[in-house]
Structure formats: structure tokens, C-alpha cells
Amino acid sequence: DEALFVAILDFRSLYPNIVRTHNISGEMMVKNPENVSAEERFRKDQRGALSELMNRILQQRYQILAKLKDLEEIQKSETEIKQGDILKRVQRSLKLMANSLLGASNYPRGRFYSGVMANSITAIARDLLSDRLQKWTDEFSSKHHYKAEIRYGDTDSIFVEFMIPNLDPTLFQDNTSSTQISKQAYNRLLKAIEEYRNFLLQKLPEFLELQLEDIALRIILKKGRKKAYAYLSLSNEVVIKGFEAVRSDWSPLARKTQKNLLETL
């Protein structure tokens, strides 16, 4: 028997990291960039201004996120709680700065607009999320006794189905809480997913990092819409993203009805 599990893997700051990985910056653009691939349109002999600025913003944000993680693991004093709140606001501001820099390159009326830069960033991301990841996933499956297959991908994440022989799905389903799940079965599942993630990390260019966001037992994807899905997690929690059930522009009745339906499914 084969049990099917879906790992939700998320790229950390995908588009900003593409900028610093490929040294994307206006002054680093080669002549006739339309004649070469997106990855070859920017020189690598020195760090470009946009790439360097993005690098500083991301490094500072990651340092703050690491501090926040450390604070979560300790019993916090009132001072540390206030410090955590400040750090959260700072990291959100840095995230906004990074995304604003990307937006400026894609705004035709902006002073820093560059269609070539904007198109290069999205082209690199598109190639990565479709062709390259699929190729690497096929290579991974051919080398292991279980199979991994990409079922869905959006702007910065992929949903990968794992078919693992002799792993009993009933250990993870029904009314079994996460604390009751067989530790051996859980570790086996997590090991398979980590093997896959580490395999991809060895293939990915510098700065691109793939993180495990969650593991789904059952999942529903909405065709034709990005980031619209609902799934049952290992902890038996129903997670809903992008559906009308969690959108404020729909009536309470419609949201409640759809939420009840998704939870039933």
C-alpha cells in the first residue's frame, strides 16, 4: 500500500533573493539583453547597486527573524515582549522595502522602471518553479524507493505529493491528534520530505532557500486561481487560503457555508 502526503514547501523571499543571486541591477545589464537568457542579462564582475541594497535589507531582516525565533523559545519578560513587538514591526518594514524595490522596477512611470529587469526576475522564477524543479523532482524519484511529484505551484511555493510504501495513513487521519501519531511513522514521513528538500537545496543557486511550511493529508485546489487551496494538516487542522470562506468581500453566510463544506470534505 502507498500513502499519499502533500508537503507544502515555500521559497524564502523568492523574488528579492533572485535579485541578489543573479546580480540584477540596471547598471549591470549587458548589451542586447534580449539576445540572451534571463540569467545571463546581468554582469557578475561586481555587485550591482540594487543587488547590494537588496542583500543588505534581506540580511538585516533574517537577523531580526532569528532573534524573534529565539524570543519565542524562552519565557519572556515584559521588556522582551515589547522588544519582540518592535522587532516584528521592523522586519515587516524591511519586507515592504524589499518588495517596493521590486515594484519600482516594474512601474512604467517610476524613475527606476526597467522592463528588462522586471521580466528577467519573473522569467527566472517561472523557469525555476516549472521546468527546473520538475526535472530535479524526477531525478530525485529515480534515485529513491519512494516517489515525489509536484502537484501544484504558485508564485513562491510548491505542493509536492509523496507516495511512500507501507506508511499507514490511518495513523495521521480521523480523530487522531498530533500527539498520538506514531513517532516512528511521523519521523519516516519527515525524513522523506527532508531528503527531498535537501536534494533541491543542493541544486538551487546561491541565496535561494526552500522551507517546509506544512504537511497536508488531504488537499483541495481551486483551478484557475493562484493561492486558493484548503487542506487538512497533520494536526487535523483545516487550513483555508484564498477561498471565499476567508475573504472579507463575501457575505458571512457565504463564508460560513463554504467553510463548513470544506471542513466536511
Image (cartoon, helix red, strand yellow):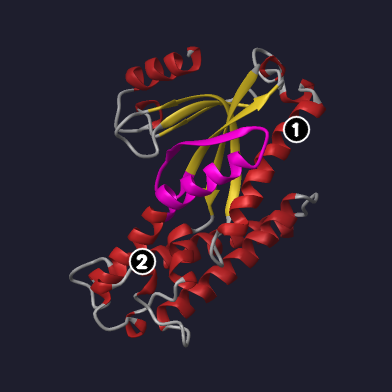
Left or right: residue 87 versus residue 25 is: right
Say whether residue 113 is visible: no
Could you say where residue 193 lies in the image, as x and y percent from the top left?
65, 40
Instruction: Identify the amino acid type marked 2.
Output: Leu
- Classify mark 2: residues with Cα within 10 Å, few (<14), some (14-19) or many (20+): many
Q: Is residue 88 above or below residue 153?
A: below
At x 52%, y 74%, the residue is 55
The answer to whether 167 is drawn above or below residue 108 in the figure is above
Q: Secondary structure at mark 1?
A: helix
Give the labeled residue for mark 1. Answer: 188
Q: Quadrant of residue 233?
A: top right
Q: Residue at x 43, y 61 (%)?
A: 15
Which residue sits at x=29%, y=33%? 224
Badge 2 marks a residue whose secondary structure is helix
Residue placed most toward the observer, 2 or 103: 2
| Residue 161 seen from this side | yes
Most extreme residue toward the left is 109
Which is closer to the viewer, label 2 or label 1?
1
Residue 26, given in percent of the width and then of the height, sits at 32, 80
Classify residue 140 by image quadrant. top right
Task: Bin the neighbour count of mark 1 within 10 Å (Cα to Cα): few under 14, some 14-19, many 20 and up.
Answer: some
First of labels 2, 1 by sequence position: 2
Q: In this figure, which residue is indicated by the disc labeled 2? A: 102
Residue type (three-letter) at the residue carrying disc 1: Arg
For residue 228, which quarter of the picture?
top left
Give residue 151's position: percent from left, percent from top: 46, 34
Q: CA distance from mark 2 to mark 1?
A: 40 Å
Task: Specify whether residue 156 is painted magenta.
Answer: yes
User: Which residues fall within the magenta stretch?
Assistant: 128-157
Q: Is residue 81 left or right of residue 57?
A: right
Question: Quadrant where the N terminus lies?
Answer: top right
